[in-house]
């Protein structure tokens, strides 16, 4: 059986974070959660993750600021941005900062899993 990617889920909304974490864990993923950008960076310093799921709108340090910091310190990280407020400008900024994907919340679990798998395959291909 193929190894599933390790996931860092970063969202300030506790209910969303808890529910998505449980759903991904039920599909066999190892999920660690963080409720803010600074906590996400602390988790990344503690251990590597294959894919980061990152909310855009968070207090103190926005998802885009967090994305920029992640890509600066961990350039090989695959970061999927989750947002309830997508726009063409936001998508362009995510790409410019090195994000892998932009998903609009709410999003079907199957789509999130498909994006995780695509990001993980891209990361594995870079290692070869």
Image: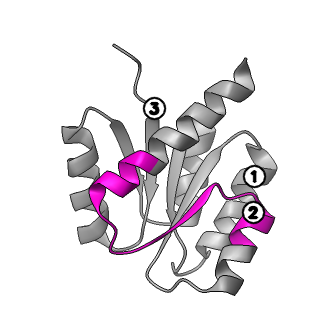
- Segment colored magenta: 93-114
Q: As displayed, is residue 35 above or below residue 122?
A: below
Residue at the spot x=66%, y=43% of the render?
77
Residue receiving disc 1: 71
Drawn side of residue 36 relative to residue 3, left or right? right
Cα distance between the residues tagged 3 and 2: 22 Å
Q: Residue 78 or 74: which is nearer the viewer?
A: 78
Q: Of discs 3 and 1, which sits in the foreground?
A: 3
Identify the image quadrant of the N terminus.
top left
Note whether residue 50 is visible. Answer: no
Residue receiving disc 2: 68
Cα distance between the residues tagged 3 and 1: 18 Å
Residue receiving disc 3: 5
Q: Of discs 3 and 2, which sits in the foreground?
A: 3
Which circle's residue, 3 or 2, is located before the other in the chain?
Answer: 3
Q: Which mark is residue 22?
A: none
Drawn side of residue 37 relative to residue 65, left or right? left
Residue 125 x, y percent position in the rendering: 67, 26
Identify the secondary structure beneath mark 2: helix
Residue at the spot x=62%, y=26% of the render?
124
Q: As displayed, is residue 47 above or below residue 10?
A: above
């Amino acid at each position: 059986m193929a190894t599933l990617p390790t996931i860092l889920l970063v969202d300030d909304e506790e209910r969303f974070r808890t529910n998505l974490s449980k759903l991904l864990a039920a599909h066999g993923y190892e999920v660690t959660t963080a409720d803010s950008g600074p906590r996400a960076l602390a988790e990344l310093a503690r251990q590597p993750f294959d894919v980061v799921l990152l909310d855009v709108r968070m207090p103190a340090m926005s998802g885009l600021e967090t994305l920029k910091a992640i890509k600066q310190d961990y350039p090989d990280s695959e970061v999927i941005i989750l947002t309830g407020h997508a726009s063409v400008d936001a998508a362009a900024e995510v790409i410019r900062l090195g994000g892998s994907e932009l998903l609009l919340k709410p999003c079907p679990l199957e789509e999130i899993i498909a994006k995780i798998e695509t990001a993980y395959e891209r990361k594995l291909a870079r290692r070869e």
